[in-house]
């Protein structure tokens, strides 16, 4: 057992998260969950990068202070991570005090090392990348990385003596060739450093939205020095309590996109060397998701949101697709077609059918008991696990999943060959079922990092809970009741799905660049749950909302007559003969109530159980289709469709809403 610290990049908050951001976070979540299953003490950090010129400009365009914009986008990140079942241990924001302490502590160390000086600088500057570029890298007034427009900027600036670190960095790459992964990216980075390093400007006077330079406050710190320091500030570096820092630093893996490799593989280790801090284990630059062969970009209007796909198919399906479809190091194309194929072939067919068939047979023939086997699958399952572990250690979730699917496919063949249904209840049939159950249990455990909810459903159905790699024995399992499992991954009817898409129902692709602005206005209008709704596609245009006549004004005392409380839905079922009404048992802490809501068309009962929502609790009881309702669930009404409100944080049942 060891310890493991993994980070994602901290995301800019000048726009909402899209599938590329979700990808990096899902990959990091996969590794974090895997290490927890190994028994490692694990820390998984993600967060947001909130300072800088880009943010200042977007906020000004939206007419709000940067922090208001940041709060709004951060709420969206929290929502998406929750919905995607991301298990991060911490979420750092660069606007937090703890972060500022960490950054200033790093800066102090750079200054103590004599690596910071003040000078005047003039050169080509890219606002979008927030970076100066050497003259020889700029062609046609465009930045070398993305072709953004370049402007000439003269600034008095503090500089970091990056040039002093060319040799130490080259030595690092020579001694630890896996410092940057995949290998091809190491070559890019080495070539860049061999080309020569100039000192790096680490302050700006042209902006105010950032951390002021101590003692010279017309300067704010360069956003990348600010941002990179998050990896240690989140651990309490510079805060007075460095327990976490001492436990977890250096990070094992900084998982990042290939576009921000230079910052992580050149600047960050140079800062750390100067600060006298240990260097991270690996910087892994993953490839990108592209849409229809083109890079996603706001101006092309082809940015894919993760949220609607998660709503439609569930977190596990989206997670699986992202992890399985493309190798982590290279680019891959996102398409609905490919997603549906993975859901239908791999999840519904291979895994879902195996799980339901096996648990069914076990229940019918063995009274749900996984009895002794004959060891016929042990070697095959162990071989799959060995290959799986080595794929994860090689940081390749895709290869790890391929190994498990190969086992799943062999299990399906094994059942067909041995036909345990032909002579039900015989010792041979029972041994076959028990062997297959053990192998499936192992496969499900290995799938937990990718499909946490479904893998848990399978292991629980097979009678195992709280499993970890360490406590697993092939022989375990006698007299353990298996429960029948069905409908784990429903097949998606492609014709129906694409019909819906053609009829302009929500898909993941964003409608237009103006979306963020529209959403902002809508969220400002619905003060009850500013960020809780789904992403824009289901929302009407702002004008439609504004056109609603304003209702008669009421006094605050009138409003206070309405008692609102948070309730946790414990049970939900459809009211017979109604396609709209759902009967719920709701926990309000000190009491449980039956409440009927007209939300069943949009929300099947099984999706409601476990949610905590706002309820009106002092309405007169009423009967709806003969069923008594003692309160009302609150929902937005978007073109006649109910959209449930939810809290951004966990709220105990019974909490008052005022
Ligand atoms: N704020 C910086 C990172 C600072 S880390 C100290 C930043 N933010 S970002 O929001 O622009 O990008 C965050 C991550 O998302 C990057 O790793 C980037 O590679 C990734 N992606 C953005 N678009 C992507 C795809 N289309 N596909 C996969 N990942 C992509 O950079």
Image (spheres, rainbow, N blue to C red):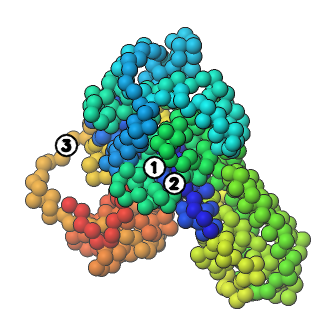
The residue to which callout 2 is attached is 249
Q: How many marks?
A: 3
Mark 2 and mark 3 lie on one chain; the one further toward the N terminus is: 2
Q: What residue do we see at 49% from left, 45% from top?
A: 276
Q: Label 1, secondary structure: give it.
A: helix
Mark 1 and mark 2 lie on one chain; the one further toward the N terminus is: 1
Residue extending furthest toward the right: 417
Where is residue 560 drawn, in percent x and y? 14, 61
The residue to which callout 3 is attached is 550
Task: Tell which of 124 and 571 is nearer to you.
Answer: 124
Task: Tell which of 433 and 159 is nearer to you.
Answer: 159
Where is residue 372 drawn, in percent x and y? 79, 86
Q: What residue do we see at 24% from left, 66% from top?
A: 656
Q: What residue do we see at 70% from left, 33% from top?
A: 187
Mark 3 and mark 1 lie on one chain; the one further toward the N terminus is: 1
Q: Are marks 1 and 2 in contact (CB under 8 Å)?
A: yes
The residue to which callout 1 is attached is 232
Give the quarter of the image for residue 154: top left
Where is residue 405 drawn, in percent x and y? 76, 59
- Foreground tag (3 vs 1): 1
Give the quarter of the image for residue 393: bottom right
Give the quarter of the image for residue 503: top right
């Amino acid at each position: 057992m060891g310890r493991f610290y993994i980070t994602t990049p901290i995301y800019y908050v000048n726009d909402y998260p899209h599938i590329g951001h979700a990808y990096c976070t899902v990959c990091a979540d996969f590794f974090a969950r895997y290490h927890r299953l190994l028994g490692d003490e694990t820390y998984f950090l993600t967060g947001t990068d909130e300072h800088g010129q880009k943010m200042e400009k977007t906020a000004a365009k939206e007419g709000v202070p940067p922090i208001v914009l940041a709060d709004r986008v951060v709420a969206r990140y929290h929502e998406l991570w929750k919905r995607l079942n991301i298990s991060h241990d911490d979420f750092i924001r660069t606007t937090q005090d703890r972060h500022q302490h960490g950054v200033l502590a790093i800066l102090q160390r750079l200054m103590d090392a004599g690596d910071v000086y003040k000078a005047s600088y003039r050169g080509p500057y890219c606002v979008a990348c927030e970076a100066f570029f050497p003259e020889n890298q700029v062609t046609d007034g465009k930045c070398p990385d993305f072709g953004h427009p370049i402007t000439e900027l003269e600034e008095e600036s503090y500089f970091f003596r990056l040039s002093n670190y060319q040799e130490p960095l080259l030595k690092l790459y020579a001694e630890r060739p896996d410092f940057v992964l995949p290998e091809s990216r190491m070559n890019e980075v080495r070539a860049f450093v061999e080309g020569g390093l100039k000192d790096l400007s680490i302050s700006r006077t042209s902006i105010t939205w950032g951390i002021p330079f101590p003692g010279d406050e017309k300067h704010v710190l360069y956003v990348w020095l600010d941002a990179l320091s998050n990896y240690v500030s989140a651990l309490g570096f510079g805060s007075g309590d460095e327990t976490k820092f001492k436990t977890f630093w250096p990070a094992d893996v900084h998982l990042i996109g290939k576009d921000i490799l230079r910052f992580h593989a050149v600047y960050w280790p140079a800062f750390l060397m100067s600060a006298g801090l240990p260097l991270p284990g690996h910087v892994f630059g993953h490839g990108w998701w592209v849409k229809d062969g083109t890079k996603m970009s706001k101006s092309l209007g082809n940015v894919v949101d993760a949220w609607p796909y998660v709503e439609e198919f569930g977190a596990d399906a989206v997670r699986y697709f992202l992890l399985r479809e493309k190798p982590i190091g290279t680019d891959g194309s996102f398409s609905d077609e490919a997603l549906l194929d993975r859901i239908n072939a791999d999840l519904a067919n291979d895994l879902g059918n195996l799980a339901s068939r096996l648990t069914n047979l076990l229940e019918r023939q063995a009274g749900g008991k996984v009895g002794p086997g004959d060891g016929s699958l042990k070697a095959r399952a162990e071989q799959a696990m060995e290959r799986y572990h080595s794929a994860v250690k090689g940081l390749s979730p895709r290869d790890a999943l391929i190994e498990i699917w190969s086992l799943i496919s062999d299990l399906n063949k094994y059942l067909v060959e041995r036909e345990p249904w032909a002579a039900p209840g015989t010792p041979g049939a029972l041994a076959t079922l028990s062997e297959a159950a053990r192998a499936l249990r192992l496969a499900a455990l290995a799938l937990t990092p990718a499909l946490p909810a479904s893998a848990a459903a399978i292991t629980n159905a097979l009678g195992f809970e709280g499993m970890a790699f360490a406590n697993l024995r092939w022989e375990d399992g006698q007299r353990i009741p298996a429960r029948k499992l069905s409908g784990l991954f429903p097949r998606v009817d492609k014709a129906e799905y694409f019909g819906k898409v053609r009829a302009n129902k929500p898909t993941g692709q964003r409608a237009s660049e103006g979306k963020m602005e529209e959403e902002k206005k809508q969220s400002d209008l619905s003060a009850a749950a500013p960020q809780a709704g789904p992403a824009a596609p289901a929302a009407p245009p702002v004008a439609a909302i504004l056109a609603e006549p304003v209702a008669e004004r009421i006094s605050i005392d009138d409003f206070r007559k309405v008692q609102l409380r948070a309730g946790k839905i414990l049970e939900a079922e459809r009211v017979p003969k109604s396609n709209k009404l759902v009967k719920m048992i709701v926990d309000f802490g000190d009491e449980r109530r039956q409440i009927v809501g007209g939300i069943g068309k949009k929300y099947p009962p099984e999706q409601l159980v476990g949610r905590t929502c706002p309820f009106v609790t002092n309405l007169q009881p009423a009967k709806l289709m003969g069923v008594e309702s003692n309160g009302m669930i609150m929902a937005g009404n978007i073109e006649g469709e109910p959209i449930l409100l939810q809290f951004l944080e966990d709220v105990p049942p019974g909490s008052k809403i005022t």
